Image (cartoon, grey):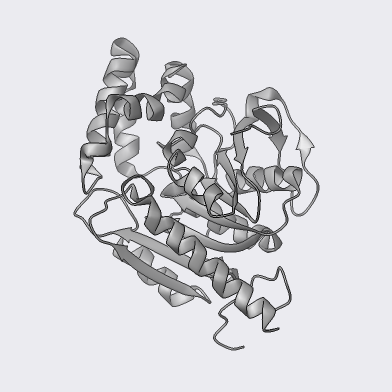
Amino acid sequence: MTTAPGLLLALLAAQGRGPALPAAAAESLHVTAAGSGPAVVLIPGLFGSSYGFRVLGPLLNAAGYRTIIVEPLGVGWSARPANADYSLTSQADRLAAVLDTFQVGSVLVVAHSLGSAIAFHLAIRRPELVRGIVSLEGGPTEEATTPSFRRALRLAPLLRLFGAPMVRGKIKGMLKESSGDPSWVTEDVLHGYTDGATKSLGASIHAFQAMSKAKEPELLAPRLREIRCPVQLMVGGAPHDGGADSAEIALLKRTLVSFEADTVWGAGHYIHEEQPGAVLGAVRRIEAAIVRDEEEGVLPAGECDAHRPDR
């Protein structure tokens, strides 16, 4: 696996469709690329990291895809500036800047949890960059953090006092409660999920506080109809915490041009950990449908209007 370019990309998303501009290292993103072939961009959720795709990534590479894992600002090993704009809109613009830098054209996006909302914003703001979206338990949330997350931030003084062991304990409980089969949550996995955040616990807390106060310049719900590419939502079938709620799923069904929802039985919130093969299958299905429509002349190559009901 290689990291490109230079492990930490200091990027600032230009407004609209402008070019990527270099930014201060304070807003650097951790980006990892591997493999060759059609590009699949992987976006972890709020408590995820590139480590979470350590199984899915090689599966995609072996299937002939190039993977580009982008950890959003404040996530994984990306920077955690206290005063940055952590709105989902800005996170999507940073992601667009990464794709502009890699010059990969239109990509498939596999996004987990909160990462899915970033993917939806990207498909609206830069539709030419997105061929399709596989959302792993992620709905069209309108904010980076939930009320329960903001309540948890009140524990910040305790987190500072007890440090990394307390953080790992909290994350371990969350991962297990969110899983159909929690046996994958080992000590090595726990470190993989938390080492980026605990390296500078103070910076992580400040970043999370900034996320909880972030204001969205534009809401998703009124613009979901603008997403023309196919969207596949994968929902874990085992009882678990987290995931898109029924209202969010109903909104996606009502507004998206092309939408399907599949249940992955036995898995919980972390489908890519528990059943990565199912995620690979979803990527193959979307890719095959897009390629078929392009070859049949239903759409021009690279367009994002596959499966339009009015075609």
Give the residue drawn at x 80%, y 46%.
19
Residue at 54% across, 70% down: 230
Compared to residue 271, the image places residue 230 above or below, namely below
Q: Nearer the viewer, residue 133 or 215?
A: 133
Q: Residue furthest bottom?
A: 310
Residue 169: which quarter of the image? Answer: top left
Q: Is residue 279 above or below residue 185?
A: below
In depth, the one of 67 and 49 nearer the eye is 67
Relative image position of residue 206 (x, y in whole percent): 47, 24
Please name the residue shown 63% across and 60% down the image.
130
Q: Is residue 231 left or right of residue 2?
A: left
Residue at 71% over, 83% down: 297
Q: Is residue 46 in view from this perspective? A: no
Q: Is residue 270 visible?
A: yes
Across and down, in percent, residue 237 comes to 24, 60
Query: In which quarter of the view is residue 105 placed?
Result: bottom right
Asked whether, in this view, residue 48 is left or right of residue 287, the answer is: left
Give how far across and how far down residue 104 sits, in percent. 72, 52
Is 227 left or right of 98, judged from the image as shown? left
Task: Indicate left or right for 4 with 243 as reference.
Answer: right
